[in-house]
Amino acid sequence: MTKKLQCISPIDGSVFAEREVMERKYAKFNIAQALAAQAGWAFTPLEERIRLVMAGVEHLGEMNDEIVPELAHMMGRPVRYGGEFGGVKERAGYMAGIAEAALADNVIEDSEKFRRVIKREPHGVVFVIAPWNYPYMTAINTVAPALIAGNSVILKHATQTLLVGERMVRAFVEAGVPELVFQNIFLDHDTTGALIADNNFDFINFTGSVGGGRSIERAAAGTFTGLGLELGGKDPGYVREDADLDAAVATLIDGAMYNSGQCCCGIERIYVHNKLYDDFVAKAVAIVRNYKLGNPLDPATTLGPMAHIRFANEVRAQVAEAVKAGATAHIETFAEDDGGAYLTPQILTGVNHEMRVMREESFGPVVGIMSVEDDAEALELMNDSEFGLTASLWTRDVERAEMLGSIIQTGTVFLNRADYLDPGLCWTGCKNTGRGGALSVIGFQNLTRPKSYHLKKA
């Protein structure tokens, strides 16, 4: 019996889309076709590869009116926010703009006797395993530079956003990217692991849970396949005494609650200098109480359902445990909270690092706020985490911020902003957040390998 993947819509619990799982033997055939097509794609001039990739991005943008409600159905983001095309275009465009320089030969010597050069060579077939929370932007981080660098790409998208990979590939192929060079396939976890263990791929990029990352590492063990892993996060914000309070509250709370808190670099814990603490909490509570929880297809909705009821139940469990242990929940249950995917956003005080809500990834619309005495206490708390993706500092003292940033165990340090991915900087993490790096010049380096030429002239 053919196995099927089903996307259950958080709007009403109905089956929004389903696709048949590809059998392992057919998936291997598709991957072999991608490898065979990759050589010709790599010999296509760089300028042409860039043109075709950017044409694919533009064609994807032309589908935005269909994509926005589709995303609302699949993962619950309100239509008022308009999809992800702006971020997709920014990231792909930046990588296209730096490609020539990033992939250029490094000429060590070109004399009468010798030519010594380091070149960048594509890996071959890049396997992209993309998540559901920002399904287009997270995928494009690897898809665009991988294709530009001359790789073939196999895309496997999350079941919750089942139609995204299909739509992305259609847009790029219709724009002129060879259909064997960029393919979408539907796989279950077991088949995915088996294909990785069989050494079918030349590089793998995964964005998802720590457990998922461990499964991929285990499957890839002994294959020597390169891995890029962006896993969990518990990103902190720290508001110093000299911060712009209103700006800090507005940005950090938006960073905690936007997309129902389902952001890779969302703010999950906030530390505020004790002189600003009471005002910060009062302003934060006022903002959250003003949210409108509801059907994401309604333009008035500012906070949609979580992508799946099990995600919402995990947040509920963390909040309930914290309150039982002495925390204070400041937001009364919204009328629209149905005990399922529609979840009341929450601000907690009286929290500590013994509570799961301050230690484990919540990935939902909840944030704990703690008062701190000084930088030393804030730094200790910020680093008291198994994760390290981003950290947000709020102060008018730029030099002090950079010094604090050097102590924080994280992949990106923000000053007076949060929850943003700058394509000119490496998107990376440390500790259990993962390994590798996407975007920037480093993104191209990770999607290619160095090849040296030591040529003695006759």
Image: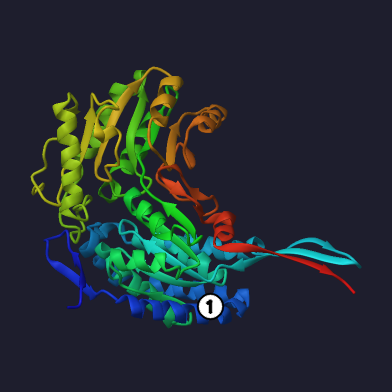
Quarter of the image holding residue 393? top left
Residue appearing at x 57%, y 60% in the figure: 444
For this view, does 134 lie left or right of residue 406? left
Classed neighbour count for the residue bearing mark 1: other residues with Cα under 10 Å, few (<14), some (14–19), many (≥20): many
Which quadrant is the N terminus positioned in?
Answer: bottom left
Q: Position of residue 345 (x, y in %)?
A: 20, 41
Residue 433 showing in the rendered view: yes
SS at mark 1 in the image: helix
Residue appearing at x 34%, y 31% in the figure: 270
* Image position of 435 with respect to 149: above or below: above
For this view, does 46 lie left or right of residue 218? right
Residue appearing at x 57%, y 29% in the figure: 399
In the image, what residue type sits under mark 1?
Answer: Gln
Q: Position of residue 169 (x, y in %)?
A: 39, 75
Q: Nearer the viewer, residue 456 or 382?
A: 456
For this view, does 242 lie left or right of residue 252? right
Which quadrant is the C terminus positioned in?
Answer: bottom right
Residue appearing at x 38%, y 37% in the figure: 386
Q: Position of residue 138 (x, y in %)?
A: 40, 59
Residue 63 showing in the rendered view: no
* Image position of 207 with respect to 400: above or below: below
Return the residue at label 1.
38
Q: Position of residue 410 (x, y in %)?
A: 46, 39
Q: Nearer the viewer, residue 79 or 420?
A: 420
Q: Nearer the viewer, residue 291 or 458?
A: 458
